[in-house]
Image (spheres, grey):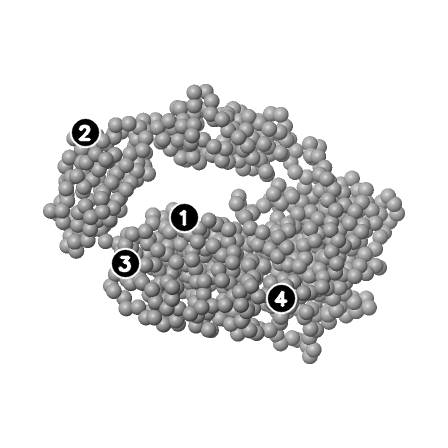
Amino acid sequence: MKKQVKQSKRPAGAWLHPAFVGRGIFVLLTLAFVFWITPFAPGQQRHRGSGKMPSSSLSSLTDHQNGQQAHTTPSSIRDRHQTTVSKAANPRPAPSIQGVSSDIDCNTAPGIVIHDDGTVESGYTSGPGIMGIFADKFTPAVYPSSYTSVCLAFNTLCGGPRLQPIEVVVFADDGPGGSPGTELGSLPVTITSLPIFPDPVPAWGSFDISSLNIVVNTGSVYIGARWAPTLPETFLASDENGPGSGNGYYFDSIRNVWTPIQAFFPSYRALFVRAVERVGGLAVVNTVPAAGSVVSTQPSDFIVDVREPVQPATLQASDFTVNGIAANSVDYTPGATTMTFHFTNTPVTTQGAQTMHIAQGAFLSDPAGDPVHEFNGTFYYDVSLLQVDSTVPAVGGTFSPPAPGTYQYDVNWNEALDPTSVQPSDLTLSGVPSATVTGVSVINGNMTTRFTLNIPFGASLTASIAAGAITDQFGNPGNAFSGNYTVPGCSPDQYVITDGTDAIVPGNTDIGNNCDECDTFVSLPFNFQLYRTTYTSVNVSSNGRLDFVNANEPGGFATDCPPSLPNPLTGLSYDNTIFVVWQDLRTDSAPGCANFPGGVCGVFTSVTGNPPNRIFNIEWRAVLYDDDSQPQNFEVRLYENDPNQRFDVVVGTLTASRFLIDPRHWVSGVQGDSNLEVYTEDFCICPPDLPSLNVSRTYTLTHCVASSPTPTPTPTATPTATPTATATPIPRITPTPRPRPTPPARP
């Protein structure tokens, strides 16, 4: 039976950082190991082989830097009720209040403050069972302001919990140099439906924190989460390549000190913590016309809603202006929070952007006498909304000739647009891997945008223009557009899988792969083609892969469901790789090797058949890293001169770890160019579940006539791994105590 190629589940923008690896596995376990034996200064590293359990720890899903922490002293922050600020380094817990879900939109809620770029690259946690706190800094745009809701996004590992009780916590910035100090409040909540890392899409939980009455008159506050993870751990998601900064801190509850997160993890940019900021005191909360809206008539009356009643004696018509023109009169009922400003003649005289303004302190609240905050708002007057009339080819039509090729795509509008508002990025393409917009011109009296498209493959193409991306001649935002089209031509070459029951052909040549985390360079007995590229050699990984281009050890123990992202340690991609049975393995001497001939682990090869139809068999005899009594036996077979570039994977004996301390997905499949979504997955299974045993899989390539072969890359020979002091900063957990009298020493 044939298995169809599985399509990528990652959205656009998911390929942002080479450290984003290991579905659920490139563990935040660094800092969990930072203090297992002794603290390490920033930049110092441990080999991952240490098998000691932690007493205090901090860890990151992808970045693995050790760090030291600093003390705290006071700065300036107080709530609306003049909270007394303690200057202790150890946060003094405030009374907890049961949290309430707020169900806000964490992307678009009014007043939402966002530091991250919306794509998860990593995540942070303390060590198992160790209470840790992570918090980002929030500084109000105006004072006083309050924070009424918080959004948090967490991840878990393979086999980890799908919900996590935490506390939402808020701290004053009265620690040394403005670091976190006094705890202003906390709310116990539960984070649900945690996605398994790596998943670039944040799974938000939103919570109402208005009961904490966090009002900021000066300075900043730190908002985040406090929890003690279990194994496998849960992690507060983080952004590691965005333009913003959360200026976050981590609190070590064992040593009672705060330290900037970036001191531990240099790649940190922001936590996935967002908060709704609400301006305190007297402020405008809404207008009619609303800020950002588009109107088709010229208004003379403007409604303004404020948060508190206004002292009538302080309110004047001239307090409100449109396009710099003051209102002629104002209607207001004492005690109300709505007022209407009237203009004898409309101040909206031309199409385009219209500005509204109320000066700081123009009128006062009743009875407190708080001055109104400055208000600036913009709306648009547009007689006819800019929108797409037609396209060439027409929506639902076909591009010609068949792909690959360069194509002209005309978008005709209902009115003249502003040429300066048009750029190639205004048009987005989806549905065809690697289709791009390479240029645009504005023609036909500014009524047509002519885009140039590069489309490499045939498929169903969707072309979209976001609302407001292009403006009309008056600067008014255009309507959204989306159209579907057919692009004839070939799809990228993909492998398909046929199930079988072949047995392992035992290897008779030991290639010398006896190690933990190494690639062994092997010359092939014949030329072999993978994705139409010819190879004469390959790097054989101890972790169950054939790396045809990039020798991807060390760091290759962090498995990842295809399409697999680059190894965060080497920075190299897993493109042009066969994942035979990718798992965290050892091929050196271990108790589980007693199950193999001669009691020896390793990788063994043999050649069967006769030229020109030989088969090169590569057999792994290995054990699990975190339970080296458990044997693992599987094989890959490469075929000579096969017209379909065939290879087979044979799964023999796989055994699960008895501990599940640091679980890795079992992965099998093949990956070509991940940017083109060229990959085929057989399985990606989370322990304690196992793949099907004593089965075989035949991979054959589906061909596309229009494709052309790529140059033949030659793998770089790599020596058998020799551990050094900086071989890998990514520790892994080894069970302690070991289930036998004398465990083998780790390097």
Q: Secondary structure at mark 3?
A: loop
Q: Judge depth for marks 4 and 1 and give the one in front.
A: 4
Q: Position of residue 130 (x, y in %)?
A: 49, 71
Residue 85 shows in this picture: yes
Q: Position of residue 416 (x, y in %)?
A: 40, 24
Residue at the image point whose x is 37% and y is 51% from the top: 113
Q: Are marks 3 and 4 in contact (CB under 8 Å)?
A: no
Instruction: Residue 345: give its label.
Output: 2
**Mark 3 crowdedness (10 Å alpha carbons): few <14, some 14-19, many ≥20:** many
Instruction: Residue 107: give its label.
Output: 1
**Mark 1 crowdedness (10 Å alpha carbons): few <14, some 14-19, many ≥20:** few
CA–CA distance in space, label 3 to label 1: 26 Å
Q: Which residue is mark 3?
A: 217
Q: Judge depth for marks 3 and 1 and give the one in front.
A: 3
Residue at the image point whose x is 29% and y is 63% from the top: 78
Image quadrant in which the C terminus is located:
bottom right
Q: Secondary structure at mark 1?
A: loop
Residue at the image point whose x is 37% and y is 27% from the top: 473
Q: Amino acid at mark 1?
A: Asn
Drawn side of residue 142 relative to residue 589, left or right: left
Q: Which residue is mark 4?
A: 48
Q: Secondary structure at mark 2?
A: loop
Q: Amino acid at mark 2?
A: Asn
